Image (cartoon, grey):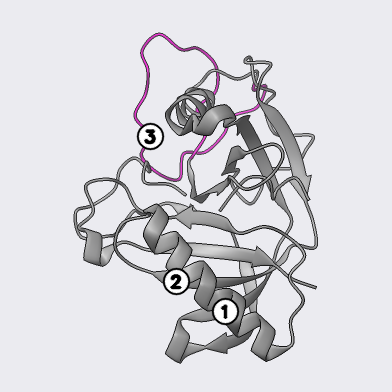
């Protein structure tokens, strides 16, 4: 799926602490199975509304800036949206302000690499403000079941590769069938000490 061409990575969450408390709403899910020794969970996510930006040529910074401008007011919101987390505001933007939700999803190993912000849980396709930037897309993800492995440190290529390999091996030994490419996800900002960071790799499963 295309989510999944996107989503749950963000070393960019605003309002974050050096000590790992980002204070933002997280995308809700139910744990189906847990392996505490390997920091692995199989999860069933609630329906999610995603606003996504293309990451052509690994342009993560550009994609993030577009999405951050969207939640900072560069949208066509018609209803009041309660702030549930601190968001740095751009004084030159207009429109409704949207709370940032963790995590930010990034899918790179797909035909259309993308980054996605998850909208607050009370948003629907009908109530999500449309982006003024026409390169952004709004979509709904349902029935997203995924295995996730949690790790600290930097969300670097080497850490992602190492934990992806562990997760794939666990899936094979546990009888789960992977149906998507790995998605990397992060929950903390750049000021958070690396050993306190919450990072994940997710793989959609049947």
Of marks 1 and 3, the one in the foreground: 1
Q: Which residue is painted at 75% across and 45% down in the image?
A: 2
Residue 29 falls in which quadrant of the image?
bottom right
Of marks 2 and 3, the one in the foreground: 2
Q: Name the residue under label 2.
A: 150
Instruction: Mark 2 and mark 1 in contact? Answer it, CB < 8 Å.
Output: yes
Q: Mark 1 points at which residue?
A: 41
Q: Which residue is painted at 52% across and 80% down in the image?
A: 40
Label 3: state its secondary structure.
loop
* Residue 45 drawn in magenta: no
Magenta stretch?
A: 77-99
Name the side, left or right, on which 134 lies relative to 83.
right
Label 2: state its secondary structure.
strand
Residue 49 falls in which quadrant of the image?
top right
| Residue 114 x/y as whole percent | 61, 38
Measured in 3D between alpha carbons, the distance from the residue under mark 2 to the one under mark 3, in whole angstroms, is 25 Å
Q: Say which label, 2 or 3, has the lower sequence index.
A: 3
Label 1: state its secondary structure.
strand
Give residue 197's mark: none
Residue 54 falls in which quadrant of the image?
top right
* Residue 85 drawn in magenta: yes
Give residue 87's mark: 3
Main secondary-structure element of the magenta-colored stretch? loop
- Mark 2 neighbour class, 10 Å CA radius: few under 14, some 14 to 19, many 20 or more: some
């Amino acid at each position: 799926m295309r989510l999944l061409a996107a989503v749950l990575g963000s070393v960019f969450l605003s309002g974050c602490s050096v000590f790992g408390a980002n204070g933002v709403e997280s995308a809700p899910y139910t744990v189906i199975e847990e392996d505490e020794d390997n920091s692995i969970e199989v999860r069933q996510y609630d329906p999610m509304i995603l606003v996504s930006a293309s990451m052509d040529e690994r342009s993560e910074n550009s994609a993030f800036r577009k999405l951050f401008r969207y939640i900072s007011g560069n949208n066509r919101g018609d209803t009041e949206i309660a702030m549930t987390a601190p968001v740095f505001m751009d004084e030159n933007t207009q429109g409704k302000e949207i709370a940032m939700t963790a995590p930010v999803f990034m899918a790179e190993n797909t035909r259309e690499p993308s980054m996605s912000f998850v909208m607050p849980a009370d948003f629907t396709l009908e109530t999500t403000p449309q982006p003024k930037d026409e390169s952004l897309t709004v979509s709904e993800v349902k029935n997203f079941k995924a295995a996730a492995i949690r790790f600290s440190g930097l969300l670097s290529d080497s850490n992602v590769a190492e934990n992806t390999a562990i997760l794939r091996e666990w899936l094979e030994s546990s009888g789960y069938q992977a149906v998507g490419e790995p998605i990397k996800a992060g929950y903390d900002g750049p000021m958070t000490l690396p050993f306190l960071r919450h990072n994940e790799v997710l793989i959609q499963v049947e």
